[in-house]
Image (spheres, rainbow, N blue to C red):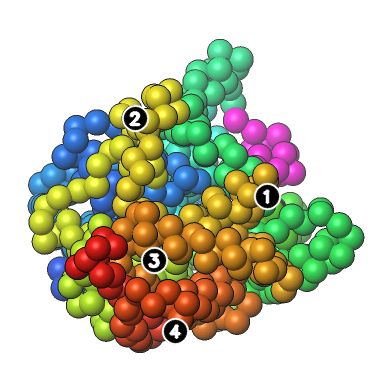
């Protein structure tokens, strides 16, 4: 008996070591060669926020992204404090979370099924290109798989030994994950639905006192999110806005939106839901009974998939990170079935399990690039040569890259009085003149234009309004020209960056085209202005086809050179 125990411990150590070695190598390889072209706007934003917390020694609850919770700003802090602000340092925190997800996935599968299912699950997530890609990106979603796996593990372990402390830890992790990314609400909702459907055998073993303590830990983990909601004037209103179009606005929009969501669903969520259902059917057909964990994981996967249809803005491909490791755990459990009959061939069965799962879940292997990067080799030297405080873009994404370049060169960071930074020095309770710096860095043409329209039309104008073919009326085009005139003559901007977007149906494609036309019209009518236009290619495979920088010069008496 003791020999068998030592044998299994040795096997477990070897499996976990091999999985972590493979996962670590694939995520760490080449990271020190990171250049500014490899940095995404959100990485620059989070990196600037973390560096500001270190530099100003004050809490920051939002950094230039009004709808994002604050906790992701704090994960890179230890590494920036130790190693400095080199670009590769931005990658350390998500890589470590990615490696932790590999280990926690192993322990999840071991608790739910067996050591061999753990081996399959750990190696699968270790080599999954989709997860590897996002494990190397400092982005809110990149931290979620580790939280998901940690909650699954604590919950499964609690059901075995009844230790309430494991539920306390799981509740704390749920709160922390929610303070990292709001989309984790979908995970929590799907978890509750799955537990109810699976039956009492998977309900937590807590009395009233322990349940209240568990809820207290959840609130504790959610405190950063509550702080943001309290201090920010914009967070709750932006969160409640229909960022992708209201699904229940009218019967026609319901049909159109549902059609769009089903197209999204088919891209990656359909294979995930289908895989979950197929695996559960196999379990039921062979064992002739309803097993709790396969049922729980199947319902969880299908419920979370359905949120891509019923949520306001739909779920993007990278939101699949919230799923992990549920589909992997369920699929890895298949190896249990032949092992029950042929225990001497457990290793071979585990390898075959990896092959079968890889074939069934091919879409997750086809996603190897992060889809939201805009940095390109050609535009970086141009950004390096123009002054940060005199440059404005259609959207603030490229401004993040520009600001990080400036930070690397000078060591200087934006002021905490910036309108788009929510900190103890810049929040809703301070007087307006202390909160609103009229020359804030993260200004963009889109926000300025919609602010003008909100003032003139007496109601907020959402960004997706640009999709309406009748949106740019003569009055609104005049408002756009006035916005650009104000940016030139009142705010003193001299360098304007526009995007040419590949997708012809993207809201910002319409805005960029209209803004370029408005700028050209202003240049034709205002003979004081001199302009130089330069086009730069976008990064391969990203949304931006090309950039256009228009440099403005004014005569000296009009505030120019």
Q: Residue furthest right?
A: 251
Q: Residue at 52%, 39% (x, y): give it.
A: 235
> Magenta span covers which residues?
186-204
The residues tagged by marks 4 and 1 sit, at their Cα atoms, a distance apart of: 33 Å
What residue did someone put label 4 on? 545
Q: Is residue 198 magenta?
A: yes
Comes first in the chain, label 4 or label 2: 2
Q: Residues at badges 2 and 1 in contact (C-beta under 8 Å)?
A: no
The residues tagged by marks 2 and 1 sit, at their Cα atoms, a distance apart of: 27 Å
Q: Residue at 67%, 46% (x, y): give it.
A: 459
232 horizontally vs 27: left or right: right
The residues tagged by marks 3 and 4 sit, at their Cα atoms, a distance apart of: 15 Å
Classify mark 2: residues with Cα within 10 Å, few (<14), some (14-19) or many (20+).
some
Q: Residues at badges 1 and 3 in contact (C-beta under 8 Å)?
A: no
What residue did someone put label 2 on? 434
Q: Residues at badges 4 and 1 in contact (C-beta under 8 Å)?
A: no
Question: What SS does tag 2 mark?
Answer: helix
Question: Residue 1: x percent and y percent?
Answer: 35, 46
Question: Residue 350: x percent and y percent?
Answer: 46, 70
Comes first in the chain, label 2 or label 1: 2
Numbered badge on residue 393: 3
Q: Residue at 74%, 55% (x, y): give it.
A: 246
Question: Residue 73: x percent and y percent?
Answer: 32, 45
Comes first in the chain, label 4 or label 1: 1
Q: Residue furthest front?
A: 557
């Amino acid at each position: 008996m003791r020999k068998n125990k030592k044998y299994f411990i040795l096997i477990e150590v070897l499996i976990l070591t091999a999985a972590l070695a493979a996962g670590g190598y694939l995520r760490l390889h080449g990271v020190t060669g990171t250049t500014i072209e490899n940095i995404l706007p959100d990485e620059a934003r989070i990196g600037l926020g973390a560096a500001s917390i270190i530099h100003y020694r004050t809490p920051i609850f939002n950094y230039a992204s009004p709808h994002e919770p604050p906790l992701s700003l704090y994960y890179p802090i230890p590494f920036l404090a130790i190693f400095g602000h080199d670009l590769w340092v931005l990658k350390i925190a998500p890589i470590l979370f990615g490696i932790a997800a590999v280990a926690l996935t192993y322990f999840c599968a071991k608790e739910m099924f067996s050591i061999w299912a753990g081996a399959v699950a750990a190696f699968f997530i270790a080599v999954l290109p989709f997860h590897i890609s996002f494990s190397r990106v400092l982005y809110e979603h990149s931290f979620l798989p580790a939280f998901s796996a940690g909650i699954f593990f604590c919950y499964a372990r609690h059901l075995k030994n009844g230790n309430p402390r494991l539920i306390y830890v799981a509740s704390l992790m749920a709160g922390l994950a929610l303070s990292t990314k709001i989309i984790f609400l979908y995970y929590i909702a799907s978890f509750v639905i799955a537990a109810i459907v699976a039956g009492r055998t998977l309900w937590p073993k807590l009395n009233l006192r322990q349940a209240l303590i568990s809820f207290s830990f959840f609130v504790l983990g959610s405190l950063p999110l509550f702080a943001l909601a309290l201090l920010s004037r914009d967070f709750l209103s932006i969160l409640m806005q229909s960022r992708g179009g209201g699904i229940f606005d009218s019967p026609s929009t319901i049909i159109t939106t549902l059609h769009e969501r089903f197209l999204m669903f088919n891209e990656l969520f359909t294979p995930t839901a289908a895989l979950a259902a197929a695996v559960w059917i196999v379990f039921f057909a062979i064992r002739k009974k309803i097993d709790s964990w396969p049922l729980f994981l199947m319902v969880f996967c299908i419920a979370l998939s359905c949120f891509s249809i019923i949520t306001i803005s739909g779920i993007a491909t990278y939101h699949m990170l919230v799923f992990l490791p549920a589909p992997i755990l369920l699929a890895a459990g298949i190896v249990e079935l032949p092992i029950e009959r042929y225990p001497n061939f457990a290793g071979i069965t585990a390898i075959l399990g990896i092959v079968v799962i890889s074939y069934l879940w091919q879409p997750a292997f086809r996603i190897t690039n992060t889809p939201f990067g805009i940095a390109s080799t050609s535009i970086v030297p141009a950004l390096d040569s123009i002054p940060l405080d005199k440059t404005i873009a259609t959207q603030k994404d490229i401004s993040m890259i520009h600001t990080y370049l400036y930070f690397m060169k000078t060591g200087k960071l934006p002021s905490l009085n910036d309108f788009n930074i929510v900190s103890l020095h810049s929040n809703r309770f301070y007087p307006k003149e202390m909160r609103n710096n009229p020359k804030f860095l993260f200004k963009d043409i889109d926000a300025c234009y919609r602010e003008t329209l909100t003032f003139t039309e007496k109601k907020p104008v959402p960004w997706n309004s640009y999709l309406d073919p009748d949106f740019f009326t003569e009055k609104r085009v005049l408002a756009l020209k006035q916005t650009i005139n104000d940016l030139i003559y009142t705010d003193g901007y001299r360098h304007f960056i526009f995007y040419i977007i590949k997708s012809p149906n993207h809201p910002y494609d319409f805005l960029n085209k209209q803004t370029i036309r408005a700028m050209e019209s202003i240049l034709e009518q205002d003979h004081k202005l001199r302009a130089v236009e330069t086009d730069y290619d976008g990064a391969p495979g990203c949304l931006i086809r090309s950039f256009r920088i228009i440099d403005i010069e004014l005569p000296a008496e009009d505030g120019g050179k």
